[in-house]
């Protein structure tokens, strides 16, 4: 086997290939077991395979480390990984821990771990890359880094909460959905530690990708001021869904601490039932006047922070231009904007076929309209025909899928109660913009 010594932090994200050269996944962590008076033994890798599932790959099946890739002997058991007693994840649980030098020369923090082949198919922890505390008060100063043998140091209490900074650095390149999945695989206490270390914006993005029970657990671990700051960064519809899961007292306290504009949007969304267009919509579409030019419209949808579904079209209304707006005039799809000169007025390019839905419309009606017109977003109006928001395809799919769809190992063709309720009124739906598949009364949605 090549690469007799490998640093674990550098393995994170490396591609895993089978002998034929086909990629089977990416390394997410290294699993070890501690031994009495001996360096920990490596038992295998935690690999993320398609579907965001984490599986176990025995170290004995690894034939090569090197050049940013891992080569295996062949097939991987695709059963979801479950951590057993005595097993420790190096990236998730060891990096960031404090150790004490046995020669009483002080303490240090583990920044990386080297594993080394000790025999055919056998690997152990050989060295630690650690950083001593800084000796200068300067904010730019850093402590000295040294290599230490495992036997040269002693870990502090393994049950003690440790810094999550190193772990977050390892996860830095993950998309929010992937990071949410990685956090869900961590022990609960470690997950909460990592969540506390995230920026408000990053944590908001991750919470939007988590099941509601974990959202509530993490928010409950934050103080009210921090929780309100995170809710400010979330999409209003996601923030409303989360607040709806809290007690009335905590929810109202957090709304009072949020930015007034964000809190107003959330309060409005909380007025609607979750299975209606109002309960599914977001209140942050792109809204412009009829005099806005094509060039200005295209500039608005280029914003990098804008979700793709919201950038697919702009809404044209009379003033004011914040929900609830003046009278809704129509939508202009970005593809149509591309076909016209930059100075063309958007008021002349409205999609005359598209009718908005009422905020009280059922989820079934929303799904039918999205499917009928091959749309990824649909405008929602109140009784006075004022725009109050848009429902996007991901809102509808998130509603139709089972509540625990993020943790499903396999594609589940069985209908859930919500899907059955919608299917009773959507038997003619052909497909929703080809963005996903869901079987309703034998029809692909």
Image (spheres, rainbow, N blue to C red):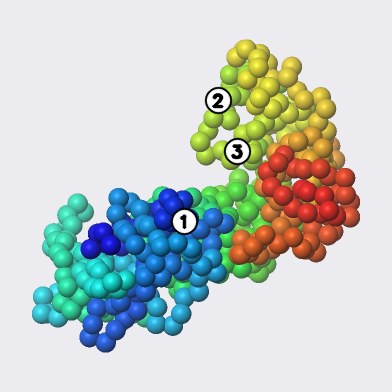
Which of the labelled discs sits on residue 34, or is there none?
none
- SS category of the residue bearing label 2: helix
In space, the residues marked 3 and 1 are separated at their CA atoms by 26 Å
Instruction: Give the residue number, with chain letter if any, for mark 1.
Output: 25
User: Is 105 or 78 nearer to us in this picture?
Assistant: 78
Mark 3 against mark 1, which lies toward the viewer? 1
Q: Position of residue 86 (x, y in %)?
A: 39, 82
Vertically, is 372 above or below 103?
above
Asked whether the viewer can see residue 346, the reply is yes
Vertically, is 389 above or below 117?
above
Q: Where is residue 146 in the image (x, y as percent from the top left)?
A: 14, 64
At label 1, counting other C-alpha atoms closer than 10 Å, the crowd grade (few under 14, some 14-19, many 20 or more) is many
- Mark 3 or mark 1: which comes first in sequence? 1
User: Is 129 or 133 nearer to us in this picture?
Assistant: 129
Q: Specify whether 348 is left or right of 54.
A: right
In space, the residues marked 1 and 2 are separated at their CA atoms by 37 Å
Which of the labelled discs sits on residue 308, or is there none?
3
Q: Specify whether 331 is left or right of 103.
A: right
Q: Quadrant of residue 296?
A: top right
Q: Specify whether 310 is left or right of 330.
A: left
- Mark 1 or mark 2: which comes first in sequence? 1
At label 2, counting other C-alpha atoms closer than 10 Å, the crowd grade (few under 14, some 14-19, many 20 or more) is few
Are the residues flagged by discs 3 and 1 in contact, CB closer than 8 Å? no
Instruction: Give the residue number, with chain letter if any, for mark 2.
Output: 299
Q: How many marks?
A: 3
- SS category of the residue bearing label 1: strand
Q: Specify whether 250 is left or right of 10.
A: right
Residue at 68%, 43% (x, y): give it: 435
Mark 1 against mark 2, which lies toward the viewer? 1
Q: Position of residue 192 (x, y in %)?
A: 46, 68
In space, the residues marked 3 and 2 are separated at their CA atoms by 14 Å
């Amino acid at each position: 086997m090549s690469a007799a010594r490998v640093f674990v932090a550098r393995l994170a994200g490396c591609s895993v290939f089978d002998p034929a050269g086909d990629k089977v996944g990416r390394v997410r962590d290294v699993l070890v077991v501690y031994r009495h008076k001996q360096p920990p033994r490596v038992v295998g890798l935690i690999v993320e395979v398609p579907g965001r599932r984490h599986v176990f790959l025995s170290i004995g099946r690894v034939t090569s480390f090197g050049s940013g890739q891992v080569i295996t002997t062949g097939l991987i058991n695709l059963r979801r990984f479950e951590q057993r007693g005595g097993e420790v994840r190096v990236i998730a649980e060891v990096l960031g821990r404090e150790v004490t030098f046995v020669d009483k020369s002080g303490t240090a923090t583990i920044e990386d771990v080297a594993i080394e082949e000790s025999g055919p198919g056998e690997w152990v922890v050989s060295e630690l890359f650690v950083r001593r505390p800084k000796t200068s008060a300067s904010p730019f100063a850093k402590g000295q880094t040294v290599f230490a043998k495992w036997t040269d140091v002693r870990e502090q209490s393994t049950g003690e909460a440790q810094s999550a900074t190193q772990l977050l650095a390892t996860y830095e390149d993950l998309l929010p959905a992937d990071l949410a999945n990685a956090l869900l695989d961590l022990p609960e206490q470690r997950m909460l530690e990592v969540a506390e270390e995230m920026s408000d914006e990053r944590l908001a993005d991750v919470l939007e990708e988590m099941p509601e029970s974990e959202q509530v657990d993490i928010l409950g671990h934050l103080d009210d001021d921090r929780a309100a700051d995170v809710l400010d960064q979330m999409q209003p519809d996601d923030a409303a869904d989360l607040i709806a899961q809290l007690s009335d007292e905590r929810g109202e306290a957090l709304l009072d601490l949020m930015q007034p504009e964000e809190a107003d949007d959330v309060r409005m969304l909380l007025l609607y039932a979750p299975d209606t267009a109002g309960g599914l919509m977001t209140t942050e579409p792109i809204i412009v006047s009829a005099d806005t030019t094509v060039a200005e419209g295209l500039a608005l949808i280029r914003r990098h922070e804008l979700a793709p579904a919201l950038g697919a079209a702009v809404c044209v209304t009379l003033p004011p231009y914040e929900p609830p707006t003046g009278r809704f005039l129509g939508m202009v799809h970005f593809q149509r904007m591309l076909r016209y000169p930059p100075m063309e007025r958007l008021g002349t390019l409205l999609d005359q076929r598209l009718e908005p839905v009422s905020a009280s419309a059922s989820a079934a009606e929303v799904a039918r309209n999205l499917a009928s017109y091959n749309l990824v977003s649909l405008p929602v109006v109140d009784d006075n025909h004022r725009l109050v928001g848009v429902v996007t395809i991901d809102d509808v799919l998130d509603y139709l899928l089972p509540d625990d769809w993020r943790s499903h190992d396999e594609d589940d063709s069985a209908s859930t109660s919500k899907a059955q309720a919608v299917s009773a009124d959507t038997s003619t739906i052909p497909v929703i913009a080809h963005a996903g598949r869901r079987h309703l009364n034998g029809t692909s949605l």
